[in-house]
Structure formats: C-alpha cells, structure tokens
Image (cartoon, rainbow, N blue to C red):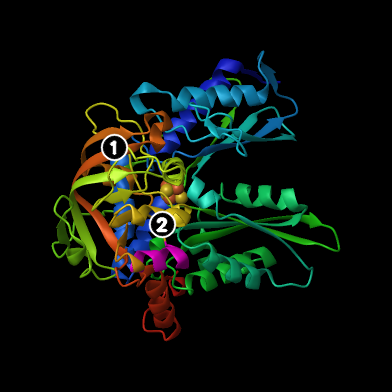
Amino acid sequence: MSIIKQADFIQSVADALQYISYYHPEDYIQALGEAYRLEESPAAKDAMAQILTNSRMCAEGKRPICQDTGIVVVFVKVGMNARFESNLTLEEMVNEGVRRAYLLPENKLRASIVDDPAGVRKNTKDNTPAVTHVQMVQGDTIEVTVAAKGGGSENKSMLAMLNPNDSIVDWVLEVVPTMGAGWCPPGMLGIGIGGSAEKAMILAKESLMQPIDMHELKARGAQNKLEELRIEIYEKVNNLGIGAQGLGGLTTVLDVKILDYPTHSASLPVAIIPNCAATRHVHFVLDGSGVAELTPPDITRYPDVHWSPSPHARRVNLDTITKAETASWQVGETLLLSGKLLTGRDAAHKRIARMLEKGEKLPVDFSNRFIYYVGPVDAVRDEAVGPAGPTTATRMDSYSQVMLDTGLIGMIGKAERGDAAITEIAKHQAVYLTAIGGAAYLVSKAIKKSHVVAFEDLGMEAIYEFEVVDMPVTVAVSAQGDSVHTSGPEEWRKKIEQHKVINVVNVS
Ligand code: SF4
C-alpha cells in the first residue's frame, strides 16, 4: 500500500498549475507548428505565428500563456490500495494547491473565480475552488490530471439529448459555426457520447486531456467506429473554413477527441467542449515517494517561428485618431497601435450602464477613445502589466449602443460581434479591432505603461489606461459594418470546396 502525504499532494497540484500556466503540452505545440506550416490564409497564419511566438516567450519567461489563467479542473484516480495521510479532504487538498499556485509571487496567476455566481459574483481572490472529479480505481497509486480551462472556450460548451437515430456529425457541424471564434481556435474539440446528460459533459472534458494524435491516426487509419467519427468530424469541421481566430483558413481544429459510455436505449446524449489556444493540462502519478516531478519541455524543439510586425501594417496614433481616419480602414487590415488606450470588460460595462441610467457622470471621458476588452494578469518584476490578451467581445455586445453614445470610436477584443452590435458600430461609424486570443504575453510587451483610472475595486476588471507602442490588431468590423468574421470563413470555405487550396486535412 502506498501512503500519499498531504504536503506532497498539495505541492504537486501547485507545481502542476504553475507548469501549465507557461508550458503548452508539446503535442499541441508540434501540431500547431505543422498547421502553421500548411496554412495558406495570411491572417490565420499571422495569428498562429503570434500564438507560437507567445508560447516560446512564456516558456522562457515563465509567465502565463494567456491572461485568463482558467478555472482549475482536476481528475483524480485514486487507487483502492492507496491511502492519504492527511487531515484535509481530497477537494480541500486540491484547493490548497490551487491557492498556492495562483498566489505564487514570482508568477502570480489571475484569479478569475467568482463566488455566488447568480448573485454578487464576488472574486474569491485565489482562484479557488477547483472542479474536482474523483474516481476509485484498482491499484495503489494516485493518478492526477490537472487542467486550467479558459472561460472563452468553456463558454462554448454544448449538450444535446439527440434522438438515437440522429446524426452526431450533423449536430456537430450545426453547432461549431454557432460557437464563433470566442473559443480561440485552433484548438481541439472534446466530445462525450452516451451515459446521462452530466456523464456526457464529463466525458467531453476528460477527452481533452488526451494528447493530440490526429496525424498518427490518419496515417494508420481508423480501427473502430469512434476513430472513424473522429476523422470525419475533424475533416468536416476544418472544411468549414473558420480558421485560426475565426479569420478564415485551413485549420480550425488540430484534433477531435471522443470518449463514450453506454446509454439508455431511448437516449443519445452528446456533449461538445472546445479547448482553446491556451491548451493547458498535465498528468502525474503519486506513489508515495514524494512530490511529482514535472519535466520542462525542450524549448529547442519548439517550431522555429518568431512573429514580428508586418512591414506593411498601418501605424496608428491613438492620441490623434479621428473618425475620418478610421473610416478608411478595411476589414482584415493589420494595424499597429501606439498611444493611450482605455480598458474595460464585463463588470465595468455593467457599472457604466447603470451610472448612465441613473444620470450620473462617468469617471472617464470616452470621447474619441478606444476601449480594450481585457482583464490583465498582475505585473511582476519590471513589467508594466502582466499578460494582457483580449477577452470575448460578444459579452460586451449589449452595451455597444450605450458605449458608442459616450463618444467612443473604437473597441478591441477577440472574436466576432453580433449583428446588433455591428449595426451600432456602422451607425456610429466606429470600428472594432481584434487582438489574438492566446497571445497575451506577446501583446503585453506592447504595453509600456499602465495605471487604473476608475473602478479600482473591480480588480482586474477595473478601467485602466494603457500606453501602447505598436500593439498588433486586425480590423474586424469596419466603419461601414463589414465583418472579417463573416467574409473570412466564407472565402476560405469556398476555396476549400473548390479545391483552390490543399487543405491540411488531406495531408498526413
Ligand atoms: S486562449 Fe482564448 S479562450 Fe483560451 S483562455 Fe485565452 S482568451 Fe480564453
């Protein structure tokens, strides 16, 4: 019988969370490097270059891959012959590991978890509690898989209770385009089939903990029904042309994972959970000999990709910008922003809207300003700000009119905008720009100064003013109301259909 000490379990969880905050799994990096090599869409290729470059920088600098350092999900398989030497419950030990990792001074991670989710939504400040799944298995070791799941990708999860004769592939192909790009593709789709409603969801999540092996699978050929399904979904989803960040391109998913379980004869539960560019998970086994050892990846094996701003990008001075200038920007165009930028996301928008409703004066003048939807990681060492990538813009859609009425002329976020928001943007002759989700550390290097200008009590959701130099963004919605997230995927779907490009799915 092995005896697992409380201190070893807690430290192993904490080490694992620090590890995955700055090291991508090697299989993800290699698969993304290959997709980058094959990508023909310039916008998607540029996005992948930023994600790959960001990944290397994070591994070298030991700083988070993404500003959203995730909700912690832990799968624990407890051997029936193992024993814990602990005065805490298993969940309490996991949470202590989370607390220790997220508050580590050298690499403090963003606390994103809120208590009372249907009420005041108060931040718990240390990213606890985790979501812990426990299974009793044969053996005398404790197997642990630790993941940190981004909110943007988790928000796109879906469950359907299909009829037994319905097509799973048809359902997935119906659902994926509705997910937009807020899940920061390219990533993976985790699919759970069978069991009950909650079992299908857990299977979908657990399937994402497996390594990416689609190219190996295609090379050896499917050997059972689930492998056939994986390949079929992988090919058909990529043929949608959604591409990296939804900009249109050849690779939307690097792999499709499926786990299944017997189900009721009247049911076909199917769950889908996407994993984003910040794919973060690691597995370790405790056998009583001490803290888990996690081997750092060999950075020399990372793809040889080093993003730098395009010489053709338009340079923009945010301090002198006018609507006459923004009106000439075309969707898909790359800009390098310099000057002062305001920030704000969900909580700040809610408060602004409430203040305006009550006729109160806002603490910030938004006239002729740009707002960046971001909740940054706290700075360490000499940083102006920690990793500070964009958050999903659609969550701010319902505030578009209110915000644009204040005189705001542009917004920066990630992924598409909804139809009503696009209408407001065109009506106000404003613009919407995107930065790359999953390239947060790279983006933060463009931020030279940062200070809070309002709503300090909201923590990372406060309104900051950033001073940026050459911050890379793409014009996603023009002043005329054109959207790159509509035109990009349309263009690439047609090209793939007409075989004008050799899709990655045909190469193994
Ligand atoms: S890559 Fe995108 S979805 Fe994933 S954690 Fe970062 S912002 Fe969220």
Q: Amino acid at mark 2?
A: Ser
Mark 1, secondary structure of its residue = helix
Q: Nearer the viewer, residue 252 or 262?
A: 252
Query: Where is 263 relative to 140, above or below?
Result: below
Q: In this picture, which residue range is highlighted in magenta?
A: 416-426
Which three-letter amino acid code belongs to the residue tagged 1? Glu
Q: Residue furthest bottom?
A: 498
* Left or right of 335 on screen, residue 357: right
Disc 2: which residue: 400
Question: Residue visible at 24% across and 35% down?
Answer: 450
Residue found at x 31% / y 49%: 371
Q: Quadrant of residue 231?
A: bottom right
Which of the labelled discs sits on residue 335, or is there none? Answer: none
Mark 1 beta carbon near ligand 1 (under 8 Å): no
In the image, is residue 44 part of the stretch drawn in magenta? no
The verdict on residue 423 being magenta is yes
Residue 376: x and y, percent? 36, 38
Can residue 291 be seen in this snapshot? Answer: no
